[in-house]
Image (cartoon, rainbow, N blue to C red):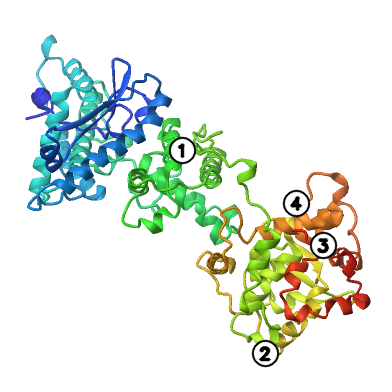
Amino acid sequence: MNALEKLEKSKASESLDHDNWYTEGDEAMKNRPGLVRRDGMYIVRRRFPVHAAEALKKSQFKVSLHTKDPQEARRLYDAAILDFHAQVAAASINAPNTVASPQVVPVSRLQAIALERVRTRWQAEELELWKPHTTFRSEDDPVRLLRIELDLLRGNAEEVYHGFLWAAEQALTAAGLEDADSTSKEVLANFLRRGDIDIFGACLRHYEGDTSHALRDNLFTSLNGFDGRAASVDVPAAAKAERSSDSRVLVDAGAAKSVNQAIALFTRDPQRANLSQKNAAGYATGFKLLREVVGGSMPLTSVSRAHAREVQALLEHLPPNASKRFSNMSLIEAVAHAKSAQLPAISSTTAKNVLSTLSSFFNWAMAEHLIKVSPFVDLKPLQKAHGIDENRRPYSPAELAQLFSNRLYQQPYALVGSACPGRYWVPLLALYHGARMNELCQLDTDDVRMVEGIWCIKITDQSSTGGKKQLKTKSSHRTIPLHPIFHYLGFIDYVRATKELRRDRLFSDLTLASTGYYSDNFSKWFYRYRKRQGVDSRLVDFHSFRHGFRDACRAMKVTTEDAVRIAGWSKGDAVESGYGLGAPLQHLVEELGKIRFLFVEALLPALQVVNEASKETGIDGQEAQTTT
């Protein structure tokens, strides 16, 4: 029985988050299972699980959102779904103990069930398509009939929906999953519907003259390549195009590249060879979302603005560290879970970075003539950006006192021991020099040296040991004098002792993370440390030392040019900033000496004699400030 003979019995399934599930091109309904529109008004409709239906005495949840505005519907949808899950939970609590808990079937398993069913049907249909057909009577015109059926499948007829739900229940029972929950049944039903829509669409294109026989739904493109005709039949070149999802396999130079193939070319581009491991990993989330939304084997040219919008919408609810926290889920599943569990999403800055990486990828593809237009142009995060009062801020004097009141800092460093020198020195160096965390964590012993008779720290990406260092910008390369305070803290003695032990790295206790940065593991320790010290505001972190240093420079009237040179900020676009060598190191020593944090120094035993020594070193106790 071919597609034409089964038109009235078709049980195709379209995902609840598919563009055409209820209304063609309705953006409000994407990624919102159960959101429908009737007579222009948005409603939410979900079927209750069997045990909940029995307890609630009704088979489905149905509520009107009382709006025709798609944006308002999106806002009200989450509250309605929460009400649905609350009713299911209440019914579960009151349900008899004999009722088995419904099983949540992983989406990957549901996809596999749908894929196998569509594989069998599509192979049978393709064989039928190549058989000779007699002349069709006008009322049996396959093009007309297929168009009618596709309209029916893409519509919202109750009988079609329930037909596919029944087919999903049968398929789950056959797979030994008869206790699957209602959501799993709905998802599979809609996968099945997508499959039939895809098959009918391919049949329609065949009768209209397109004999490439390619399924276009990203869920089923892996089935492409089956050829039901005799071997003697010449298959068009387009039908033989490479569809492998293996990114290592590339098609002929003149052929269109798949998403996976384009990503493989992008990552191997010689111009990207110097990307740090961390920066390269920054593309991972965007590429993973792109593959899930579009499909790795789909042609890159098929990625549309609608796909880009879908990625944008997913990022709005994507939980932080989703790949690690929900390693058994796809990112799309993680988003659905995060929404139902009301988990916080990534920040607007993180979402912006992901969209930026994808924009960079498609800009590269345009430059390589793989596509003509980038679908990610000017896409902004949907998350609300933090206001100025919600941005990262410097530590307050009280917070700095809390951070440095730990017993780690309550004795001279010589008595602390050598177990954790990085944990002792890095926060202090950041406080008084405004340096970035990784700049300090990756220092070699040779990076602290005498220059023009002054002890200095050299911030560079060149390592005397042959290792690889990372700096954020060109302006990060600099040589800065050591703050006079550190002569009293014993830092020079520590450096000399480390060199005598023939250690290449200044802080050998700090380990290299898988990202290629020494700062990543240190950052995790510092986060736990400041929490233990009672500094738990979400507006502060290690980078707050850098903010505090800049405020201290302003308070002590250190010029912008000197502050920029010391901390390694970008010099901006001023032409004059590129001229000359800058102020001499002795001048910078004097400027650094103005930066003092007395409430921290009072906690450090090694500095109890600093006021006496200040007369000789040029550290003026009268100018000491408590700025942050």
Q: Are marks 2 and 4 in contact (CB under 8 Å)?
A: no
- Label 4 is placed on what type of residue? Ser
Whether 117 is drawn above or below 283: the answer is above
Q: Are marks 3 and 4 in contact (CB under 8 Å)?
A: no
Q: Which residue does the image show at 25% across and 20% down from the upper left?
A: 208
Residue nearest the viewer, comparing 595 with 211:
595
Report x, y in % for residue 385. 56, 40
Pick whichever of labels 2 and 4 is earlier in the sequence.
Answer: 2
Report x, y in % for residue 79. 35, 35
Report x, y in % for residue 203. 20, 27
Q: Are marks 1 and 3 in contact (CB under 8 Å)?
A: no
Instruction: Determine the secondary structure under disc 2.
Output: loop
Pick whichever of labels 1 and 2 is earlier in the sequence.
Answer: 1
Q: Which residue does the image show at 60% across and 80% down from the upper left?
A: 420
Q: Quadrant of residue 492?
A: bottom right
Mark 4 lies on residue: 570
Whether 4 is drawn above or below 121: the answer is above
Q: Are marks 2 and 3 in contact (CB under 8 Å)?
A: no
Residue nearest the viewer, comparing 73 with 214:
73
Q: Which mark is residue 625?
A: 3
Mark 2 lies on residue: 501
Mark 1 lies on residue: 312
- Label 1 is placed on what type of residue? Gln
- Label 2 is placed on what type of residue? Leu
Pick whichever of labels 3 and 4 is earlier in the sequence.
Answer: 4
Q: Is residue 124 visible?
A: no
